[in-house]
Structures are given as C-alpha cells and as structure tokens.
C-alpha cells in the first residue's frame, strides 16, 4: 500500500519479546531518518507505552554506543488493548497528537498485527521482524535468532562437557513455544542424540529410552536431548528416563539467557539494514508493509499477506539432524 501523505515524523517502538539486535535496528532507523530530514521519536514500552503517551525525542547521540547492547533501549511490553478497536483508535490518536505520521514496529506477528491496525487508522506503519524464534513466514531471517541460537549452542557445549565427565544423560530445554528452530539448529550444531520440536509433538519417549540404552551398550558415555519449550516438561521427563534406564539424567532449562547478550555480527548487520530499509519505505510513501530477507535480498511484503503465510520446519533439515545423531559404532 502507498500513502499519499508525506512523512515528517517517525516513531519507533519494540513490541513483544525482546531480541538481541533490536538496538541495532533502532539505531539505524534513527540515523537514517535524521539523514533523510525527518524527526524521529522513540515510543517506550511498545504499544502499551504508545497508549500512555510515553514518547521521547531521539537524536543520533541518543543511539550512540547501543549497537553492541542486547535487549532494547526503548523497552518492550505486550499490550492486550491493541487487540480492541477502542485501543487501536486511542493509539492512532496519540500518534497524531505527537505528530507521528510514520511508525516503525519491531517485533513478531503480534506486533505486525498491531501495525496493520494502525495503518487502518491512517498511521503509516512498517514492521521489522524481531524475534529469536525465527517463526515469521515472510522472511528467512529474524532479528535475534542468530545470537539466541549461538547462546544456546555454547551453553549446550558446556552441559555436554560435564555430562560426559559424569556419564549422564542431559535434557537441555531451549526457547521455542510454537517454533522449534532453536532446538533444530542446536540439535545439529551440538550433535544431539535426540531433538524434540513442537512441530513434531507426537514423539515417542519409549524410543528415546531405547536409543539411550542402545547407545550406552555401544559405549557412548553421554546422551544429549535438545528439547524445545513447546514440548517442555524436561524435569519430569528426566525423572522418567532415569527410572527406565538407570542412567543419571539431568534437565537444564536455559530460559531467558537466550534473549540476552551482545548481538552477533550477523544480527547487528541485518538489523541495521532492516532498520534503514523500513525508514526508506516510509519516506517513499509505503505503508502496511513488513521488511523481510529472502534469497539474499532485503524485500518487503504487505502485512496482511505476511500474516497469512505459514512457516514449517524444513523436513530435510529435520531428517538430516536425526540421521547425523545416529551412533554407527558396533
């Protein structure tokens, strides 16, 4: 969609769960906007802060020395009120009161839905995919995934060290309530013996137990299970496995550490380009769009089209992950 209204003031907000690299996107949006001669304002605490008029001016200095920081300098929150027409109208009114005629929304599908509703209320809005889950269908990359998956991988490496020393079975639970990309990638990168994904919920625990027993018979001294949050119940699963195998089994839940930390080079670069790209779209008159990365290029989609897309775990990746975990030793 193209708007006939020229953008003079851009607002930037982060919404939903935080993701490493969000600050790089904020920084790029601010500096690109200022370079193009528009005023840039920061909206604190996502749509919730927008409802409460928590808005500040942003200068180039305000975003200096932020590209290396995890989290989001604008803070973030979830906002149930944005799901109501009354809330959407109120948010649009606050934008108009502050002279904001263009909005950059960094977050996931829920954040994009909020941006789409604001576009319906006459506020030009562009979404940037910011989520560690990599679960947005219109893009091959989301801000924060690379950092989160590397954080998880490094943690699992450490758990493997102690698991091997004590000849244990270890279940490591990673984030991913509805999407198992962190679990899948870590399963491959860490050489896990079993990977449990929410997309493959009908896993057979008895087969996992049999696999552990067979691997131990073949001389394998440890067994790593990477379990996505959407499967969960890691602690009770560990108790059942230990009871069935006689092998000491421990559960480690990585939790919110996966959201924190200094973003990787990839997250900093991709987020920076996406932040600038979003501003360029607004200045060119585009609205109701989502920035994405496909086939080596930065692209944009209609928000409605993006929200209608579905993303599934690549079957070949999953099959290879399982194949590589097989212990071929006699």
Image: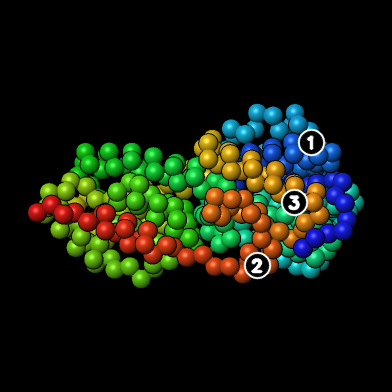
First in sequence, mark 1 or 3: give its number: 1
Q: In whole angstroms, how far apart are the C-alphas of marks 2 and 1?
A: 31 Å
Q: Residue at x 16, y 54 (%)?
A: 328
Looking at the image, tell me whether mark 2 or mark 1 is earlier in sequence order.
Answer: 1
Left or right of 171, for residue 259: right
Outermost residue toward the left?
330
* Mark 3 neighbour class, 10 Å CA radius: few under 14, some 14 to 19, many 20 or more: many
Q: Is residue 3 above or below residue 283?
A: below
Q: Are marks 1 and 3 in contact (CB under 8 Å)?
A: no
* Location of residue 59 (image quadrant): top right
**Residue shown at 80% from the left, 65% from the top:** 120
The residue labelled by disc 3 is: 281
Residue bearing mark 1: 35
Quadrant in the picture for the N terminus: bottom right
Q: Is residue 293 shown above or below 86?
A: above
Q: Which residue is mark 2?
A: 305
For label 2, count other residues whose C-alpha is less than 10 Å away and answer few (under 14), some (14-19) or many (20+): few
Q: Residues under labels 1 and 3: Cα distance?
A: 14 Å
The one of 322 and 228 positioned closer to us in this rendering: 322
Tag 2, which secondary structure?
helix
The residue closer to the viewer here, 295 or 145, is 295
Q: Is residue 246 visible?
A: no
Can residue 283 be spotted in the picture?
yes
Tell me where residue 71 appears, x and y as whole percent. 60, 41
CA distance for labels 3 and 2: 17 Å
Q: Which quadrant would the C terminus be assigned to in this image?
A: bottom left
Q: Which mark is residue 204?
A: none
Q: Position of residue 15 (x, y in %)?
A: 67, 52
């Amino acid at each position: 969609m193209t708007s006939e209204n020229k953008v003079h003031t851009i607002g930037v907000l982060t919404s939903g769960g935080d993701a490493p690299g969000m600050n790089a996107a904020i920084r790029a949006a601010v500096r690109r906007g200022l370079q193009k001669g528009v005023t840039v304002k920061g909206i604190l605490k996502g749509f919730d802060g927008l409802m409460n008029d928590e808005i500040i001016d942003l200068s180039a200095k305000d975003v200096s020395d932020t590209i290396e920081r995890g989290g989001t300098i604008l803070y973030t929150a979830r906002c149930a009120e944005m799901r109501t027409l009354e809330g959407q109208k109120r948010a649009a009114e606050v934008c108009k009161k502050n002279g904001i005629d263009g909005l950059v929304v960094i977050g996931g599908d829920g954040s994009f839905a909020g941006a789409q509703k604001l576009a319906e209320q006459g506020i030009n809005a562009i979404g940037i995919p910011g989520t560690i889950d990599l679960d947005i269908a219109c893009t091959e990359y989301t801000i924060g995934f690379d950092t989160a998956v590397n954080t998880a991988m490094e943690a699992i490496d450490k758990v493997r060290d102690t698991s091997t020393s004590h000849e244990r079975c270890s279940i490591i639970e990673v984030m991913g309530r509805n999407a198992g990309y962190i679990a899948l990638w870590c399963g491959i990168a860490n050489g896990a013996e079993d990977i449990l994904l929410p997309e493959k919920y009908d896993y057979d625990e008895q087969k996992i137990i049999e696999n552990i027993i067979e691997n131990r018979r073949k001389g394998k001294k440890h067994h790593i299970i990477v379990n996505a949050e959407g499967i969960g119940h890691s602690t009770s699963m560990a108790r059942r496995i230990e009871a069935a195998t006689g092998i000491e089994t421990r559960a480690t839940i990585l939790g919110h550490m996966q959201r924190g930390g200094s973003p990787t080079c990839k997250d900093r670069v991709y987020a920076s380009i996406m932040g600038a790209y979003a501003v360029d779209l607004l200045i060119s008159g585009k609205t109701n769009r989502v920035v994405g990365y496909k086939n080596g290029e930065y692209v944009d989609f209609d928000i409605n089209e993006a929200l209608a897309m579905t993303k599934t775990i690549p079957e070949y990746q999953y099959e290879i992950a399982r194949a590589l975990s097989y212990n071929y030793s006699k």
